[in-house]
Image (tube, rainbow, N blue to C red):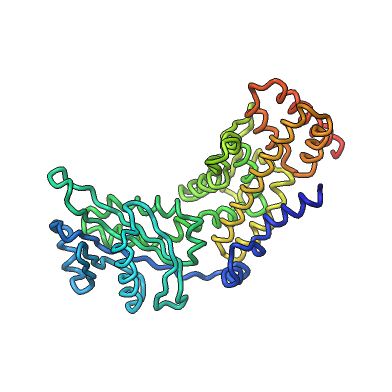
Amino acid sequence: MFTSQTSSFQDSIDVEEREDFDSEELAGFTQKVQLSCYYTIYLYQGTRSEASGENVSWNQRRADSTASQDDFSLTLVDSSLPSEAEPELRTYISRRLSKGALLGGMGNIATVELSVPEQAVGCYCCLLEQERSPEQPDADGNGYVICFMGGSEKGLNLFRLELDKYVQGLRSSLQAPENLETEVRPYLSQWYEESVMHIHRVVQLVQNNISFLLHAALSHTHVEVVNSDERTKADVTRFIKAASLQGLSQQDTTAASLCKAISEDTLSDLSIDCSTSPPTLTNGISNRFCDDWIQAFLNAAERCNPFLLRQILENFKLKAIQDMNSLKRFVRQAEMSHYALFRCCQFLQGCGNGDVLLQNARAEHSDLPEACSIITVLEDFLREQSQAQA
């Protein structure tokens, strides 16, 4: 049984052996990554819509950089792509719009071939529609198509939610053309740092103490960051949210309820004091399960590969939710079988995450007396094991 558990756990950590990545992507995962990232923004206009004064300004700026179709036109506003690559991207976006493949506010990710050193890159594009006026509710809308390019399609897919949120942050700045130099361009140029690199920055910040943050995310422990800038505080908050199991499974109601379970015990907040280098962590709690993932995170951070880091984090969450489901099954069986109770004890001893699993199981089964009695026995077993080892 323990051999099987160890094998399954090692498969979760060894992202480089996963079958859902091709050989080229695996080669990129095992090397230090130096990514080139690009952005492009286009003005999108339905041909039946009259351009507003602000849109006329965009058109005057890029009058020779427009792709027109029967029902829309696409005008370049700004781009960091090489001059020979931008028309290729515009042709690709025009095809996607013609097929109705870009829906307002929803990002679309694909691989595109452009005249850039990488040749084929992952491309996130989103149609950000402007609000339609009450006077013309049925008129074809205007808006902006925003494109972010870098890494691979599968890599960008790991950050889809972050990219969607980042694009929405442009809405207010796009109301006036004069914001291009002061707001829009700086914002777009930071897409990779702000939407993709936050996990990497957190791992680099805490190093071996990353296990404390992983445990805090699983156990719903509040994390407080002091003596740091706002960006670091936001990075840690986003890391904890990304490592949390909340909302991981929508189809499995058991997993969903376990993700939302909150400990009945009062845990002290995990404090990260950034006034020292490295930061000082207070009230840090970890376990063998979280400790076993430290080296995988450090290796990926050393390679500067945020996509690998995110995949490792997803594997960490997947393994945790699998163990939670296994424990619930064992607890249900243990209500009718002493042997199943023995298997529960073996499982908790082997998985290294017993404290978190039982914490969530107790919250989930709080209204089931028989299950609670089983969980109490298991808690006593873990406590005795811990005292014996000490």
Residue 23 found in image quarter: bottom right
| Relative horizontal placement of residue 43, taking residue 258 as reference (left or right) | left
Q: Viewer-proximal residue, 72 or 266?
A: 72
Q: Position of residue 90 (x, y in %)?
A: 31, 70
Q: Residue at x 23, y 70 (%)?
A: 67
Q: Residue at x 21, y 65 (%)?
A: 73
Q: Position of residue 77 (x, y in %)?
A: 26, 65
Q: Residue at x 16, y 43 (%)?
A: 134
In this rendering, the answer to whether 228 lies above or below 100 is above
Q: Viewer-proximal residue, 272 or 72?
A: 72
- Going by the picture, which residue comes out furthest to the right? 388
Q: Viewer-proximal residue, 226 or 83?
A: 83
In this rendering, the answer to whether 85 lies above or below 386 is below
| Relative horizontal placement of residue 221, taking residue 42 as reference (left or right) | right
Quadrant containing the C terminus in the rendered view: top right
| Relative horizontal placement of residue 166, taking residue 142 as reference (left or right) | right
> Would residue 93 be seen by someone viewing this image from the given angle?
yes
Q: Residue at x 71, y 37 (%)?
A: 327
Q: Viewer-proximal residue, 162 or 257?
A: 257
The number of discs equals 0
Q: Position of residue 47 (x, y in %)?
A: 17, 61
Q: Position of residue 366 (x, y in %)?
A: 64, 24
> Would residue 187 be seen by someone viewing this image from the given angle?
no
Residue 124 found in image quarter: bottom left
